[in-house]
Amino acid sequence: MTTSKSKIFAYFIAGIFGGTILGIAAFLTMTNYGGNYGCSPFIDSLFGTAGYESCGSFGALIGILVGCIIGITIISKAKITKYSKIAIYLLLGSFLLPFIYGVIIFWPPFEDGDLLIVPPIVLLFMLFSAIPSLLITGVINWQKFLRRKQ
C-alpha cells in the first residue's frame, strides 16, 4: 500500500489545523489561569516570566504539540478517499474558525482596533503549528520519503 502525496499533505495540514485550534484554545485558557492564580515556579523559570505570560506560553506550546498529534492521528484513522479536498477544507478551517471566534469576542469589529490583531495572531499560530506538523508527518512517513523508485 503506497501513500500518495495528497495523503501526506493532508496529514501535514491536519497537524496545522489541530495545532492552531488547540494552541489558541490552550493559550487563552492558560493565560486566564495564570492571570488569576499564577503559574508554577518551574514553568515561570522555564520561560523567564511570571503569571499569565509564562502560563500562556506554556499553554500555547503544549496545545500546539498535542493538537498536531491529535489532528494527524484522527486523519490517519479516518477512511477518506479525497485527501486533497480534506486538506483544503482543513487549511481554510484552521484560519476561519479562530478568526470567527475573534470576531465574536471583539464585537463590534474595528471599534477600538482589537479585531485588527486577530488575523496576524492566527497566522502566527498556523506558522508555529507547521513546524511540529512537518516533523511528525516526516517521522510517520520517513520510509516512504527515502524509498527509491524502481
Image (tube, grey):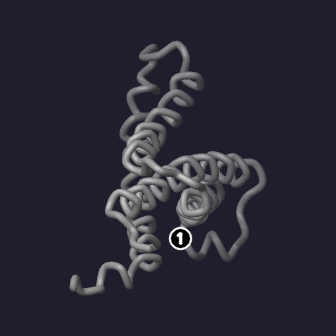
Q: Position of residue 122 (x, y in %)?
A: 43, 42
Residue 9's image quarter? bottom left
The quarter in which the C terminus is drawn is bottom left
Q: Mark 1 = which residue?
A: 48
- 127 relative position to 45: left or right: left
In the picture, measured across the screen, residue 20 lies left or right of residue 7, that is right
The amino acid marked with disc number 1 is Gly
The percent coordinates of residue 136 (x first, y second) are 46, 72
Q: In terms of depth relative to the viewer, which is nearer, 94 or 55?
A: 94
Do we see residue 48 in this rendering? yes
From what the image shows, is residue 102 above or below residue 23? above
Screen quadrant of the N terminus? bottom left
State the residue in front, 69 or 86.
Answer: 86
Q: Residues within 10 Å of mark 1 (few under 14, many from 20)?
A: few
Quarter of the rendering containing residue 57: bottom right
Image position of 58 with respect to 17: above or below = below
| Residue found farthest to the right | 37
Query: Which quadrant holds residue 66?
Result: bottom right
**Depth order, front residue of 141/80:** 80
**Residue positioned 44% across, 26% down in the render:** 115
Q: Count the labels in the image.
A: 1
Q: Position of residue 96 (x, y in %)?
A: 46, 33
Q: Secondary structure at mark 1?
A: loop
Instruction: Tell me: residue 9, above or below residue 45.
Output: above
Residue 75, how many percent across, how many down?
A: 55, 57
Q: Can residue 62 be seen by looking at this rendering?
A: no
Give the residue at x 47% y 31%: 99
Q: What residue lies at 52% left-to-right and 34% top-to-bottom?
A: 97
Residue at image point 47% right, 50% down: 81
